Image: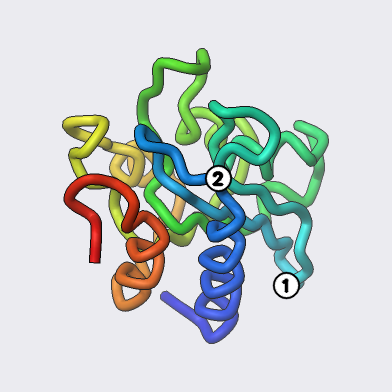
Amino acid sequence: MTTTDDRRWMTAAIELSRLCPPAEGAYSVGAIIVDEHGEEMARGYSRETDPHVHAEESALAKLAPNDPRLPGATLYSTLEPCSQRKSRPLSCTQLILASGVRRVVIAWREPPLFVGDCIGVETLRNAGVTVVELSDMAAQARAVNAHLPGLGK
């Protein structure tokens, strides 16, 4: 179930993704964590603190791992959270599951550009996390990644 707030927060996450330094081998993604009362807890974007940091990872790193608000929070990400990666020991999907966040909203699923079969959405859902896809906002999130092969305008 989507809400007006979902669209508002996803629009903010898409704007945040525009801060990402473009990289030939990585998506530009924005992520925002919002508590159950609609208050922003943290935000992050790809390559915010180093060339390998992902948006969800960056946002989650700004919170204490045992923050009691996390189980009631929603994580907004402009792209499906990664299910595998080479640059870190844990994928964003694993980080979300470890955080206790129970609701994730995405704009689009990861295409097979860098990973042949991303299963972030399926993994989260199988663990009981509610995942909402705002597919009508996918084009806006994808446009930020027009620098990548096959995703250009």
Residue 92 in picture, x, y percent from top left = 49, 34
Query: Are the two marked residues, 2 and 1, in contact with CB atoms closer than 8 angstroms?
Result: no
Which residue appears at 54% of the width and 74% of the height? Answer: 11
- Tell whether 137 sits left or right of 60: left
Query: Is any atom of residue 127 visible in this view?
Result: no
Which residue appears at 70% of the width and 34% of the height? Answer: 49
Q: Which of the 4 quarters of the picture holds residue 8?
A: bottom right
- Tell whether 116 sits left or right of 135: left
Which quarter of the image is occupied by the C terminus? bottom left
> What secondary structure is found at the residue carrying circle 1?
loop
Q: Which three-letter amino acid code belongs to the residue tagged 2?
A: Pro
- The one nearer the camera, 100 or 45, is 45
Q: Is residue 71 above or below residue 37?
A: above
Q: Earlier in the sequence, mark 2 or mark 1?
A: 2
Q: Which three-letter amino acid code belongs to the residue tagged 1?
A: Gly
Residue 115 in picture, x, y percent from top left = 24, 30
> Colour scheme in the image?
rainbow
- The one nearer the camera, 24 or 76, is 24
> What secondary structure is found at the residue carrying circle 2?
loop
Q: Which of the 4 quarters of the picture holds residue 118?
A: top left
Which class describes the residues within 10 Å of circle 2: few (<14), some (14-19), or many (20+)? some
Query: Is any atom of residue 14 visible in this view?
Result: yes
Residue 33 in picture, x, y percent from top left = 66, 56
Q: Which mark is residue 21?
A: 2
Q: Which mark is residue 38?
A: 1
Which residue appears at 30% of the width and 71% of the height? Answer: 139
Residue 74 in picture, x, y percent from top left = 60, 59
Q: Is residue 116 above or below residue 88?
A: below
Query: Disc 2 vs disc 1: which is toward the camera?
Result: 2
- The one nearer the camera, 80 or 3, is 80
